[in-house]
Image (cartoon, rainbow, N blue to C red):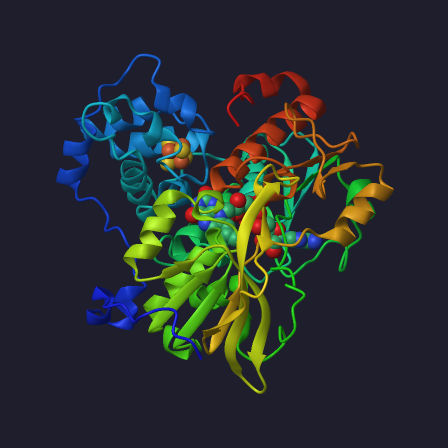
Amino acid sequence: MAEHYKPVKYKAWEMTLKERFQEFYPPLSEREAITEANRCLYCYDAPCLTACPTHIDIPTFIKKIATGNVKGSAKTILESNLMGATCARVCPVQELCEGACVLNDEHKPIAIGRLQRYATDYAIQRDFKFFKKGKPNGKKVAVIGAGPAGLSCAGELAKQGFDVTCYEKKPLAGGLDTYGIVVFREPIEVSLREVKMIEDLGVNIKTNVEIGKDIKLEELVDQYDAVFISIGLGAVPQMEIPGENIPGVLDGLEFIEETKTMPLDQIKFGKRVAVIGAGNTAIDAATISRRLGAERVMMVYRRSEAEMPAYHFEYEFALGEGVSFMFLTQPIAVIGDKQVEGLKCVRMDLGEPDASGRRAPVPIPNSEFVIDCDMVIKAIGQKKYTGFMDALAKLGIGSVKGYIKIDLKTNRTDHPKIFAGGDCVRSQGEASTVMAVQDGKIAAQAITAQLVGEAAKKQPVSASVR
Ligand SMILES: Cc1cc2nc3c(=O)[nH]c(=O)nc-3n(C[C@H](O)[C@H](O)[C@H](O)COP(=O)(O)OP(=O)(O)OC[C@H]3O[C@@H](n4cnc5c(N)ncnc54)[C@H](O)[C@@H]3O)c2cc1C
Ligand code: SF4
Protein backbone atom coordinates (compact mmCIF):
# COMPACT_ATOMS: atom_id res chain seq x y z
CA MET A 1 0.00 0.00 0.00
CA ALA A 2 1.13 3.50 -0.76
CA GLU A 3 2.79 5.60 1.95
CA HIS A 4 1.05 8.93 2.29
CA TYR A 5 2.54 10.23 5.44
CA LYS A 6 5.63 9.96 7.56
CA PRO A 7 5.82 9.41 11.32
CA VAL A 8 6.23 12.73 13.08
CA LYS A 9 8.52 13.21 16.05
CA TYR A 10 6.30 14.29 18.87
CA LYS A 11 7.34 15.88 22.14
CA ALA A 12 4.37 14.40 24.05
CA TRP A 13 6.01 10.97 23.82
CA GLU A 14 8.22 12.16 26.65
CA MET A 15 5.15 12.50 28.92
CA THR A 16 3.27 9.73 30.68
CA LEU A 17 -0.17 8.82 29.34
CA LYS A 18 -1.81 10.56 32.31
CA GLU A 19 0.21 13.73 31.75
CA ARG A 20 -0.79 13.82 28.09
CA PHE A 21 -4.47 14.02 29.10
CA GLN A 22 -4.10 16.71 31.72
CA GLU A 23 -5.44 20.19 30.95
CA PHE A 24 -3.36 21.61 28.13
CA TYR A 25 -3.12 25.09 29.65
CA PRO A 26 -2.00 25.21 33.29
CA PRO A 27 -4.02 27.48 35.61
CA LEU A 28 -2.75 31.03 36.08
CA SER A 29 -0.99 31.66 39.37
CA GLU A 30 -2.25 34.55 41.53
CA ARG A 31 0.66 36.69 40.39
CA GLU A 32 0.12 35.90 36.71
CA ALA A 33 -3.61 36.61 37.01
CA ILE A 34 -3.09 39.98 38.71
CA THR A 35 -0.40 41.01 36.21
CA GLU A 36 -2.63 40.06 33.27
CA ALA A 37 -5.67 41.76 34.83
CA ASN A 38 -3.67 44.96 35.26
CA ARG A 39 -3.05 45.10 31.48
CA CYS A 40 -6.79 45.67 30.92
CA LEU A 41 -7.70 49.23 29.90
CA TYR A 42 -11.26 48.90 31.32
CA CYS A 43 -12.62 50.46 28.16
CA TYR A 44 -15.81 52.45 28.28
CA ASP A 45 -18.26 50.63 25.95
CA ALA A 46 -15.92 47.63 26.02
CA PRO A 47 -16.14 45.73 22.71
CA CYS A 48 -15.34 42.42 24.46
CA LEU A 49 -18.58 42.65 26.43
CA THR A 50 -20.62 42.93 23.24
CA ALA A 51 -18.63 40.17 21.55
CA CYS A 52 -19.38 37.72 24.37
CA PRO A 53 -22.68 36.04 23.47
CA THR A 54 -23.64 35.93 27.18
CA HIS A 55 -22.58 39.57 27.75
CA ILE A 56 -20.42 38.92 30.79
CA ASP A 57 -19.28 42.26 32.26
CA ILE A 58 -15.66 41.49 31.37
CA PRO A 59 -14.01 44.79 32.44
CA THR A 60 -15.67 44.51 35.86
CA PHE A 61 -14.67 40.90 36.49
CA ILE A 62 -11.11 41.67 35.42
CA LYS A 63 -10.95 44.76 37.63
CA LYS A 64 -12.05 42.64 40.59
CA ILE A 65 -9.21 40.19 39.95
CA ALA A 66 -6.74 43.09 39.79
CA THR A 67 -7.95 44.34 43.17
CA GLY A 68 -7.83 40.90 44.82
CA ASN A 69 -11.62 40.39 44.91
CA VAL A 70 -11.60 37.03 43.13
CA LYS A 71 -14.83 35.88 44.76
CA GLY A 72 -16.62 38.99 43.50
CA SER A 73 -15.10 38.46 40.07
CA ALA A 74 -16.55 34.93 39.88
CA LYS A 75 -19.96 36.24 40.92
CA THR A 76 -19.88 38.82 38.11
CA ILE A 77 -19.11 36.07 35.60
CA LEU A 78 -21.70 33.59 36.84
CA GLU A 79 -24.44 36.22 37.01
CA SER A 80 -24.33 36.31 33.21
CA ASN A 81 -23.21 32.77 32.48
CA LEU A 82 -23.77 29.87 34.88
CA MET A 83 -21.45 27.72 32.77
CA GLY A 84 -18.61 30.25 33.12
CA ALA A 85 -16.00 27.66 34.11
CA THR A 86 -16.68 25.58 31.01
CA CYS A 87 -16.86 28.57 28.69
CA ALA A 88 -13.54 29.84 30.08
CA ARG A 89 -11.97 26.66 28.70
CA VAL A 90 -13.86 25.94 25.49
CA CYS A 91 -14.97 29.27 24.02
CA PRO A 92 -13.36 30.15 20.69
CA VAL A 93 -12.09 33.32 22.37
CA GLN A 94 -10.10 34.45 19.33
CA GLU A 95 -13.41 34.78 17.49
CA LEU A 96 -15.32 36.28 20.43
CA CYS A 97 -14.21 38.33 23.47
CA GLU A 98 -10.45 38.27 22.91
CA GLY A 99 -10.89 38.85 19.19
CA ALA A 100 -12.68 42.12 20.03
CA CYS A 101 -10.10 43.34 22.58
CA VAL A 102 -8.65 46.74 21.60
CA LEU A 103 -5.17 45.56 22.59
CA ASN A 104 -5.14 43.27 19.53
CA ASP A 105 -4.01 46.28 17.50
CA GLU A 106 -0.98 47.13 19.62
CA HIS A 107 0.25 44.11 21.48
CA LYS A 108 -1.79 41.04 22.33
CA PRO A 109 -5.33 40.77 23.68
CA ILE A 110 -6.09 40.30 27.36
CA ALA A 111 -6.27 36.57 28.14
CA ILE A 112 -9.97 36.86 29.04
CA GLY A 113 -10.67 33.12 28.91
CA ARG A 114 -7.81 32.24 31.24
CA LEU A 115 -8.74 35.02 33.70
CA GLN A 116 -12.32 33.78 33.65
CA ARG A 117 -11.06 30.28 34.42
CA TYR A 118 -8.92 31.65 37.28
CA ALA A 119 -11.90 33.35 38.94
CA THR A 120 -14.49 30.58 38.38
CA ASP A 121 -12.11 27.82 39.51
CA TYR A 122 -11.33 29.83 42.65
CA ALA A 123 -15.03 30.03 43.50
CA ILE A 124 -15.92 26.46 42.58
CA GLN A 125 -12.99 24.99 44.54
CA ARG A 126 -14.23 26.85 47.62
CA ASP A 127 -17.85 25.87 46.92
CA PHE A 128 -19.11 29.46 47.12
CA LYS A 129 -22.85 29.60 46.61
CA PHE A 130 -23.71 32.91 44.95
CA PHE A 131 -27.31 32.22 44.06
CA LYS A 132 -30.24 30.55 45.71
CA LYS A 133 -33.56 29.21 44.53
CA GLY A 134 -36.09 32.00 44.14
CA LYS A 135 -39.30 32.21 46.17
CA PRO A 136 -41.59 29.50 44.71
CA ASN A 137 -43.91 31.02 42.10
CA GLY A 138 -46.13 27.94 41.73
CA LYS A 139 -45.11 27.17 38.12
CA LYS A 140 -43.43 23.98 36.84
CA VAL A 141 -41.07 23.70 33.89
CA ALA A 142 -39.62 20.56 32.26
CA VAL A 143 -36.23 20.75 30.55
CA ILE A 144 -35.34 17.99 28.07
CA GLY A 145 -31.58 17.42 27.85
CA ALA A 146 -29.04 18.48 30.49
CA GLY A 147 -26.34 19.96 28.25
CA PRO A 148 -25.22 23.60 28.58
CA ALA A 149 -28.45 24.95 27.04
CA GLY A 150 -30.68 22.90 29.35
CA LEU A 151 -28.62 23.54 32.48
CA SER A 152 -28.44 27.27 31.81
CA CYS A 153 -32.21 27.49 31.29
CA ALA A 154 -32.92 25.31 34.35
CA GLY A 155 -30.59 27.33 36.60
CA GLU A 156 -31.98 30.71 35.51
CA LEU A 157 -35.56 29.48 36.01
CA ALA A 158 -34.75 28.10 39.47
CA LYS A 159 -33.38 31.53 40.43
CA GLN A 160 -36.80 32.94 39.49
CA GLY A 161 -38.66 30.48 41.74
CA PHE A 162 -39.77 27.88 39.18
CA ASP A 163 -40.01 24.22 40.08
CA VAL A 164 -37.69 22.75 37.42
CA THR A 165 -37.20 19.11 36.44
CA CYS A 166 -34.52 18.29 33.91
CA TYR A 167 -34.69 14.96 32.02
CA GLU A 168 -31.41 13.56 30.68
CA LYS A 169 -31.05 10.29 28.79
CA LYS A 170 -27.40 9.71 29.66
CA PRO A 171 -26.15 8.47 33.05
CA LEU A 172 -24.44 11.83 33.70
CA ALA A 173 -25.68 15.35 33.07
CA GLY A 174 -23.60 18.02 31.30
CA GLY A 175 -24.16 17.05 27.65
CA LEU A 176 -21.11 17.46 25.45
CA ASP A 177 -19.30 19.37 28.23
CA THR A 178 -19.27 16.08 30.13
CA TYR A 179 -18.96 13.59 27.28
CA GLY A 180 -17.71 15.44 24.19
CA ILE A 181 -15.10 18.12 24.92
CA VAL A 182 -11.65 16.56 25.01
CA VAL A 183 -10.32 16.01 28.48
CA PHE A 184 -7.19 18.10 27.93
CA ARG A 185 -9.46 21.08 27.20
CA GLU A 186 -12.08 20.41 29.85
CA PRO A 187 -11.75 17.69 32.50
CA ILE A 188 -15.06 15.98 33.24
CA GLU A 189 -14.93 17.24 36.87
CA VAL A 190 -15.38 20.85 35.71
CA SER A 191 -18.62 19.99 33.94
CA LEU A 192 -19.88 17.88 36.85
CA ARG A 193 -19.19 20.70 39.32
CA GLU A 194 -21.38 22.97 37.19
CA VAL A 195 -24.10 20.32 37.18
CA LYS A 196 -23.93 20.26 40.98
CA MET A 197 -24.22 24.04 41.10
CA ILE A 198 -27.50 23.78 39.13
CA GLU A 199 -28.75 21.00 41.43
CA ASP A 200 -27.86 23.16 44.44
CA LEU A 201 -30.32 25.71 43.04
CA GLY A 202 -33.05 23.12 43.55
CA VAL A 203 -33.23 21.76 39.98
CA ASN A 204 -34.22 18.09 39.95
CA ILE A 205 -32.06 16.36 37.32
CA LYS A 206 -33.39 12.93 36.37
CA THR A 207 -30.73 11.02 34.45
CA ASN A 208 -31.22 7.83 32.40
CA VAL A 209 -34.63 9.10 31.25
CA GLU A 210 -35.15 9.52 27.52
CA ILE A 211 -38.09 11.66 26.51
CA GLY A 212 -39.85 10.05 23.57
CA LYS A 213 -38.93 6.60 24.85
CA ASP A 214 -39.36 6.44 28.63
CA ILE A 215 -41.82 9.34 28.85
CA LYS A 216 -43.88 10.76 25.98
CA LEU A 217 -43.28 14.40 25.04
CA GLU A 218 -47.06 15.01 25.13
CA GLU A 219 -47.16 13.93 28.79
CA LEU A 220 -44.64 16.62 29.72
CA VAL A 221 -46.57 19.22 27.74
CA ASP A 222 -49.73 18.29 29.67
CA GLN A 223 -48.07 18.15 33.10
CA TYR A 224 -45.86 21.26 32.99
CA ASP A 225 -46.54 24.94 32.47
CA ALA A 226 -43.70 25.14 29.93
CA VAL A 227 -41.18 22.79 28.30
CA PHE A 228 -37.65 23.70 27.15
CA ILE A 229 -36.13 21.35 24.56
CA SER A 230 -32.33 21.21 24.49
CA ILE A 231 -31.56 17.76 23.10
CA GLY A 232 -28.52 18.77 21.05
CA LEU A 233 -27.70 16.56 18.09
CA GLY A 234 -27.19 12.81 17.78
CA ALA A 235 -24.48 10.35 16.79
CA VAL A 236 -22.15 10.62 13.79
CA PRO A 237 -24.09 9.62 10.64
CA GLN A 238 -23.24 6.63 8.44
CA MET A 239 -20.89 7.43 5.55
CA GLU A 240 -22.76 4.96 3.30
CA ILE A 241 -19.57 3.48 1.86
CA PRO A 242 -18.56 -0.21 1.58
CA GLY A 243 -16.66 -1.63 4.56
CA GLU A 244 -18.11 0.82 7.06
CA ASN A 245 -18.94 -1.93 9.54
CA ILE A 246 -15.53 -3.62 9.58
CA PRO A 247 -14.05 -3.78 13.11
CA GLY A 248 -11.75 -0.80 13.53
CA VAL A 249 -14.19 1.76 12.10
CA LEU A 250 -15.24 3.98 15.03
CA ASP A 251 -17.74 6.75 15.73
CA GLY A 252 -15.67 9.85 16.61
CA LEU A 253 -18.02 10.95 19.41
CA GLU A 254 -17.99 7.52 21.06
CA PHE A 255 -14.20 7.50 20.84
CA ILE A 256 -13.95 10.90 22.56
CA GLU A 257 -16.47 9.78 25.19
CA GLU A 258 -14.28 6.79 26.07
CA THR A 259 -11.40 9.11 26.92
CA LYS A 260 -13.67 10.98 29.37
CA THR A 261 -15.22 7.96 31.03
CA MET A 262 -12.75 5.04 30.82
CA PRO A 263 -9.26 4.43 32.22
CA LEU A 264 -6.92 5.73 29.52
CA ASP A 265 -4.84 2.55 29.35
CA GLN A 266 -7.94 0.51 28.44
CA ILE A 267 -8.84 2.52 25.34
CA LYS A 268 -8.12 0.81 22.02
CA PHE A 269 -6.40 2.98 19.45
CA GLY A 270 -4.86 2.43 16.05
CA LYS A 271 -1.21 2.80 15.15
CA ARG A 272 -2.07 4.37 11.83
CA VAL A 273 -5.35 6.26 12.03
CA ALA A 274 -7.43 7.94 9.31
CA VAL A 275 -9.96 10.45 10.64
CA ILE A 276 -12.73 11.41 8.22
CA GLY A 277 -13.97 15.01 8.54
CA ALA A 278 -12.49 18.39 9.49
CA GLY A 279 -14.70 19.86 12.22
CA ASN A 280 -14.57 19.90 16.04
CA THR A 281 -15.10 16.17 16.45
CA ALA A 282 -12.57 15.25 13.78
CA ILE A 283 -9.82 17.47 15.23
CA ASP A 284 -10.49 16.15 18.73
CA ALA A 285 -10.52 12.50 17.63
CA ALA A 286 -7.26 13.05 15.75
CA THR A 287 -5.41 14.78 18.60
CA ILE A 288 -6.67 12.21 21.11
CA SER A 289 -5.37 9.41 18.88
CA ARG A 290 -1.95 11.03 18.88
CA ARG A 291 -1.95 11.49 22.64
CA LEU A 292 -3.02 7.89 23.18
CA GLY A 293 -0.01 6.78 21.19
CA ALA A 294 -0.93 6.55 17.46
CA GLU A 295 2.18 6.87 15.33
CA ARG A 296 0.44 8.46 12.37
CA VAL A 297 -2.82 10.31 12.20
CA MET A 298 -4.16 11.57 8.90
CA MET A 299 -7.25 13.74 8.58
CA VAL A 300 -9.15 13.20 5.35
CA TYR A 301 -11.45 15.97 4.11
CA ARG A 302 -13.25 16.19 0.79
CA ARG A 303 -13.08 19.98 0.51
CA SER A 304 -10.07 22.31 0.78
CA GLU A 305 -8.38 23.93 3.79
CA ALA A 306 -10.39 27.13 3.19
CA GLU A 307 -13.72 25.31 3.68
CA MET A 308 -12.83 23.22 6.73
CA PRO A 309 -15.33 23.81 9.57
CA ALA A 310 -12.73 23.70 12.38
CA TYR A 311 -11.43 27.02 13.69
CA HIS A 312 -7.96 28.03 12.52
CA PHE A 313 -6.53 27.72 16.04
CA GLU A 314 -7.84 24.15 16.23
CA TYR A 315 -6.19 23.37 12.90
CA GLU A 316 -2.90 24.79 14.16
CA PHE A 317 -3.23 22.82 17.39
CA ALA A 318 -3.70 19.60 15.43
CA LEU A 319 -0.69 20.37 13.24
CA GLY A 320 1.35 20.99 16.39
CA GLU A 321 0.26 17.59 17.68
CA GLY A 322 1.72 15.98 14.57
CA VAL A 323 -1.59 15.35 12.79
CA SER A 324 -1.37 15.42 8.96
CA PHE A 325 -4.12 16.70 6.68
CA MET A 326 -5.21 15.38 3.33
CA PHE A 327 -7.57 17.87 1.69
CA LEU A 328 -9.70 17.36 -1.43
CA THR A 329 -9.88 13.67 -0.68
CA GLN A 330 -13.11 11.64 -0.51
CA PRO A 331 -13.17 8.20 1.14
CA ILE A 332 -15.02 5.66 -1.04
CA ALA A 333 -14.46 2.34 0.80
CA VAL A 334 -12.90 0.89 3.92
CA ILE A 335 -10.63 -2.01 3.02
CA GLY A 336 -10.17 -5.09 5.18
CA ASP A 337 -11.91 -8.24 6.27
CA LYS A 338 -11.74 -8.89 10.02
CA GLN A 339 -9.90 -5.61 10.67
CA VAL A 340 -9.35 -2.30 8.88
CA GLU A 341 -6.39 -2.46 6.49
CA GLY A 342 -6.81 0.74 4.55
CA LEU A 343 -9.08 3.53 3.37
CA LYS A 344 -9.73 3.76 -0.35
CA CYS A 345 -10.11 7.39 -1.48
CA VAL A 346 -10.54 9.45 -4.60
CA ARG A 347 -9.03 12.87 -5.22
CA MET A 348 -11.41 15.80 -5.60
CA ASP A 349 -11.53 19.13 -7.36
CA LEU A 350 -13.70 22.11 -6.43
CA GLY A 351 -16.61 22.86 -8.77
CA GLU A 352 -19.54 25.29 -8.65
CA PRO A 353 -20.95 26.43 -5.24
CA ASP A 354 -23.48 24.00 -3.73
CA ALA A 355 -26.51 24.64 -1.46
CA SER A 356 -24.16 25.52 1.45
CA GLY A 357 -22.60 28.29 -0.64
CA ARG A 358 -19.24 26.50 -0.65
CA ARG A 359 -17.66 25.19 -3.84
CA ALA A 360 -18.78 21.59 -4.30
CA PRO A 361 -16.10 18.89 -4.36
CA VAL A 362 -16.11 16.87 -7.61
CA PRO A 363 -14.24 13.54 -8.02
CA ILE A 364 -11.25 13.52 -10.37
CA PRO A 365 -11.59 10.47 -12.68
CA ASN A 366 -9.06 7.63 -12.19
CA SER A 367 -7.48 9.22 -9.12
CA GLU A 368 -8.26 6.45 -6.60
CA PHE A 369 -5.61 5.50 -4.07
CA VAL A 370 -5.41 3.75 -0.68
CA ILE A 371 -4.37 5.22 2.65
CA ASP A 372 -2.56 2.65 4.77
CA CYS A 373 -4.28 2.55 8.17
CA ASP A 374 -5.53 0.14 10.84
CA MET A 375 -8.26 2.38 12.27
CA VAL A 376 -10.81 4.70 10.67
CA ILE A 377 -12.63 7.29 12.78
CA LYS A 378 -15.81 8.80 11.34
CA ALA A 379 -16.30 12.43 12.35
CA ILE A 380 -18.53 13.90 9.66
CA GLY A 381 -20.94 15.84 11.86
CA GLN A 382 -23.92 14.79 13.97
CA LYS A 383 -27.32 13.38 13.01
CA LYS A 384 -30.51 15.22 13.83
CA TYR A 385 -33.08 13.43 15.98
CA THR A 386 -35.64 12.75 13.24
CA GLY A 387 -38.00 10.77 15.54
CA PHE A 388 -38.14 13.66 17.98
CA MET A 389 -38.73 16.10 15.12
CA ASP A 390 -41.67 13.97 13.95
CA ALA A 391 -43.17 14.17 17.46
CA LEU A 392 -42.72 17.96 17.40
CA ALA A 393 -44.34 18.19 13.95
CA LYS A 394 -47.42 16.44 15.38
CA LEU A 395 -47.63 19.26 17.94
CA GLY A 396 -47.55 21.79 15.10
CA ILE A 397 -43.90 22.78 15.55
CA GLY A 398 -42.02 23.67 12.38
CA SER A 399 -38.41 23.00 11.43
CA VAL A 400 -35.62 24.68 9.47
CA LYS A 401 -33.26 22.32 7.63
CA GLY A 402 -34.06 19.60 10.21
CA TYR A 403 -33.50 21.91 13.23
CA ILE A 404 -36.30 23.08 15.52
CA LYS A 405 -37.78 26.38 14.33
CA ILE A 406 -37.86 29.10 16.99
CA ASP A 407 -38.55 32.78 17.34
CA LEU A 408 -35.06 34.28 17.79
CA LYS A 409 -36.13 36.87 20.39
CA THR A 410 -37.79 34.39 22.78
CA ASN A 411 -36.62 30.93 21.67
CA ARG A 412 -40.29 29.92 21.61
CA THR A 413 -41.37 27.33 19.04
CA ASP A 414 -44.65 27.38 17.13
CA HIS A 415 -46.27 25.82 20.22
CA PRO A 416 -47.01 28.42 22.94
CA LYS A 417 -45.81 26.18 25.81
CA ILE A 418 -42.68 24.82 24.14
CA PHE A 419 -39.31 26.59 23.89
CA ALA A 420 -36.03 25.26 22.48
CA GLY A 421 -32.34 26.12 22.35
CA GLY A 422 -28.77 24.97 21.78
CA ASP A 423 -27.52 22.81 18.94
CA CYS A 424 -31.01 21.49 18.10
CA VAL A 425 -32.05 24.97 16.89
CA ARG A 426 -28.73 26.09 15.35
CA SER A 427 -29.76 25.96 11.69
CA GLN A 428 -27.20 28.65 10.90
CA GLY A 429 -23.98 29.96 12.45
CA GLU A 430 -21.42 28.11 14.53
CA ALA A 431 -22.68 25.78 17.26
CA SER A 432 -20.86 26.48 20.52
CA THR A 433 -21.27 26.07 24.24
CA VAL A 434 -21.58 29.79 24.93
CA MET A 435 -24.36 30.15 22.34
CA ALA A 436 -26.20 27.24 23.94
CA VAL A 437 -25.88 28.92 27.36
CA GLN A 438 -27.29 32.15 25.95
CA ASP A 439 -30.21 30.30 24.36
CA GLY A 440 -31.02 28.86 27.77
CA LYS A 441 -30.97 32.35 29.31
CA ILE A 442 -33.18 33.85 26.61
CA ALA A 443 -35.73 31.04 26.91
CA ALA A 444 -35.72 31.30 30.72
CA GLN A 445 -36.46 34.98 30.49
CA ALA A 446 -39.23 34.46 27.93
CA ILE A 447 -40.79 31.67 29.99
CA THR A 448 -40.68 33.89 33.07
CA ALA A 449 -42.29 36.75 31.15
CA GLN A 450 -44.99 34.44 29.81
CA LEU A 451 -45.82 32.71 33.09
CA VAL A 452 -45.16 35.24 35.82
CA GLY A 453 -44.89 38.54 33.96
CA GLU A 454 -42.97 41.52 35.29
CA ALA A 455 -40.26 39.67 37.22
CA ALA A 456 -38.66 38.76 33.91
CA LYS A 457 -37.78 42.31 33.05
CA LYS A 458 -35.12 42.47 35.76
CA GLN A 459 -32.36 41.09 33.56
CA PRO A 460 -32.84 42.07 29.91
CA VAL A 461 -31.15 39.74 27.43
CA SER A 462 -30.18 41.05 24.02
CA ALA A 463 -30.63 38.70 21.10
CA SER A 464 -28.72 40.98 18.74
CA VAL A 465 -25.26 39.43 19.04
CA ARG A 466 -26.14 35.78 19.21
C1 LIG B 1 -16.47 16.83 19.76
C2 LIG B 1 -17.02 18.20 20.01
C3 LIG B 1 -16.18 19.19 20.47
C4 LIG B 1 -16.68 20.46 20.70
N1 LIG B 1 -15.81 21.42 21.12
C5 LIG B 1 -16.31 22.65 21.38
C6 LIG B 1 -15.45 23.67 21.86
O1 LIG B 1 -14.25 23.46 22.03
N2 LIG B 1 -15.99 24.88 22.13
C7 LIG B 1 -17.33 25.15 21.97
O2 LIG B 1 -17.78 26.25 22.28
N3 LIG B 1 -18.15 24.21 21.48
C8 LIG B 1 -17.68 22.97 21.19
N4 LIG B 1 -18.51 22.02 20.70
C9 LIG B 1 -19.94 22.36 20.51
C10 LIG B 1 -20.66 22.34 21.86
O3 LIG B 1 -20.27 21.22 22.59
C11 LIG B 1 -22.16 22.35 21.63
O4 LIG B 1 -22.50 23.47 20.83
C12 LIG B 1 -22.94 22.42 22.95
O5 LIG B 1 -22.64 21.33 23.77
C13 LIG B 1 -24.45 22.42 22.66
O6 LIG B 1 -25.15 22.35 23.86
P1 LIG B 1 -26.60 21.70 23.91
O7 LIG B 1 -27.03 21.82 25.33
O8 LIG B 1 -27.44 22.26 22.85
O9 LIG B 1 -26.40 20.16 23.50
P2 LIG B 1 -25.59 18.96 24.16
O10 LIG B 1 -24.38 19.41 24.85
O11 LIG B 1 -25.43 17.97 23.05
O12 LIG B 1 -26.61 18.38 25.23
C14 LIG B 1 -27.82 17.76 24.85
C15 LIG B 1 -28.24 16.79 25.94
O13 LIG B 1 -29.54 16.30 25.67
C16 LIG B 1 -29.58 14.91 25.96
N5 LIG B 1 -30.70 14.32 25.21
C17 LIG B 1 -30.80 14.15 23.87
N6 LIG B 1 -32.00 13.61 23.56
C18 LIG B 1 -32.67 13.44 24.73
C19 LIG B 1 -33.97 12.94 25.04
N7 LIG B 1 -34.82 12.52 24.10
N8 LIG B 1 -34.33 12.87 26.36
C20 LIG B 1 -33.49 13.30 27.35
N9 LIG B 1 -32.23 13.80 27.08
C21 LIG B 1 -31.84 13.88 25.78
C22 LIG B 1 -28.20 14.43 25.52
O14 LIG B 1 -27.87 13.19 26.11
C23 LIG B 1 -27.32 15.57 26.00
O15 LIG B 1 -26.89 15.38 27.33
C24 LIG B 1 -18.05 20.74 20.46
C25 LIG B 1 -18.89 19.74 19.97
C26 LIG B 1 -18.38 18.48 19.74
C27 LIG B 1 -19.30 17.42 19.19
S1 SF4 C 1 -18.09 33.32 28.04
FE1 SF4 C 1 -16.64 32.88 26.40
S2 SF4 C 1 -16.89 34.61 24.95
FE2 SF4 C 1 -17.84 35.23 26.92
S3 SF4 C 1 -16.16 36.34 28.01
FE3 SF4 C 1 -16.10 34.19 28.69
S4 SF4 C 1 -14.59 33.19 27.35
FE4 SF4 C 1 -15.18 35.14 26.36
- Count of marks placed on residues: 0
- Residue drawn 50% across the image and 55% down it: 328
Q: Which of 38 and 346 is in front in this view?
A: 346
- The structure residue drawn at horizontal position 77% and vertical position 47%, both measured from the top left corner, is 389
Whether 350 is drawn above or below 34: the answer is below
Specify the quarter for ligand 2: top left
| Farthest top residue in view | 44
Q: Give how far across and how far down residue 158 sits, in percent.
A: 57, 36
Q: Can residue 453 be seen in this view?
A: yes
Residue shown at 58% from the left, 37% from the top: 153
Q: Where is residue 68 in the image (x, y as percent from the top left)?
A: 19, 31
Q: Up-down: is 195 above or below 242?
A: above
* Screen quadrant of the N terminus: bottom left
Q: Where is residue 61 in the image (x, y as percent from the top left)?
A: 30, 27
Can residue 175 be seen? no
Provide residue 441's location: percent of width, then percent of height: 55, 31
Q: Residue furthest front?
A: 366
Examine the rendered structure and indicate whether residue 325 appears above or below residue 463.
below
**Quarter of image, res 352:** top right
Q: Which of 199 and 287 is in front in this view?
A: 287
Q: Answer left or right for 21 relative to 408.
A: left
**Residue 316 appears left or right of 197:** left
Q: In which quarter of the image is residue 99?
A: top left
